[in-house]
Image: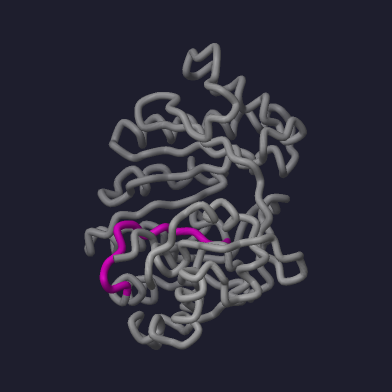
Amino acid sequence: MRKKVYVEITNVCNLHCAFCPGTRRTPRTMSPEEFALVLDRLQPRPSYVYLHVMGEPLLHPQLPELLAIAAQRSQKLCLTTNGTLLREHAQALLRSPVLYRVAISLHSIGENGGNPADAREYLENVWSFSSRAAARGVIIALRLWNGGAADAGNETILDFLREKTGCSAWPEPRARSFRLSERIYLELENAFDWPDRSADECGVEFCRALREQLGVLADGTVVPCCLDHDGDLALGNLFTQELAEILRSPRARAMLEGFSRRRPSEDFCRRCGYALRFNRINPVEP
């Protein structure tokens, strides 16, 4: 059973972050009927469905209906958001019995300008939602995935979190994640290079793609992971095919076998900076 499946309910976003490559695909939002079909065809059922590839999931105009569809199937949900729309959608999210984890990209606010008052209001809304969600059992991951870049407003963010938590000191800089309060965590990560066909090969040997995760884009296209932002590695379409058929395709099998041999079959994968962190993992047979 795959632990994670990333389902892109919309590829439209309300921000333009330097960290995110965006997508050249036609703007599209997955309908509730399509979302239900995707969940039903994810067999065996994954442990978690992440509402994330590209786009801002809180922009979906029928988000409460999607949450209800997942609840009908007892499918645990995680989502990644830039946090700018949390105030508007807080009640729908907090009422969901299947919302398991919310990751909030705090570096988004620093990368999109704005004045200090805007940043303060944004952080207050994020903290208010995070506190209420954590009290209901939802795990909150507050992300600074920009390598500590001073020009991205990190100090403002960290000062705010110190104020809210009463923490006067942080763990060692090498700590990647640590608890701020019950069920609320701060994640510190370096920025990474998204896969890009025009980049040089970077020495990737192994990846968890297809073995532990896969992605479904807003038009139903199945891709091996959440970093395939333009659908370069399309394997099939879950709107018209069963997942088992898609994963039996020659391309999907070649990808699994290539990672097991530590020789990625796809040129795209050999140019993925994120996958470098998996090189030390001992792969298993496909």
Res 49 → quadrant: bottom left
Span of residues in magenta: 42-54
Quadrant housing the C terminus: bottom left
Query: Residue 50 magenta-drawn?
Result: yes
Image location of residue 276, percent across then percent down: 60, 55
Number of labels in the image equals: 0
Of residue 61 and residue 193, the one placed in the foreground of this image is 193
Q: At 55% across and 14% down in the image, what residue appears?
A: 169
Q: Establish if 263 lies above or below 194.
A: below
Q: Can the viewer see residue 283?
A: yes
Q: Give 1 or 83, whichever is nearer the viewer.
A: 1
- Which residue is rendered at x = 50% and y = 69% of the image? 259
How far from the left and from the top, in percent, is residue 66? 36, 62
Residue 156 colored magenta?
Answer: no
Q: Residue at x 44, y 63 (%)?
A: 6
Q: For the stretch drawn in magenta, what is the main secondary structure?
A: loop
At which x and y percent is residue 28?
A: 56, 72
Image quadrant where residue 275 sits: bottom right
Answer left or right for 256 relative to 233: left
For this rendering, which residue is in front, 224 or 183?
224
Q: Residue at x 74, y 30 (%)?
A: 150
Answer whether residue 126 is visible to the viewer in this image.
no
| Residue 125 percent across, percent down from the top left | 51, 33
The N terminus sits in image quarter:
bottom left
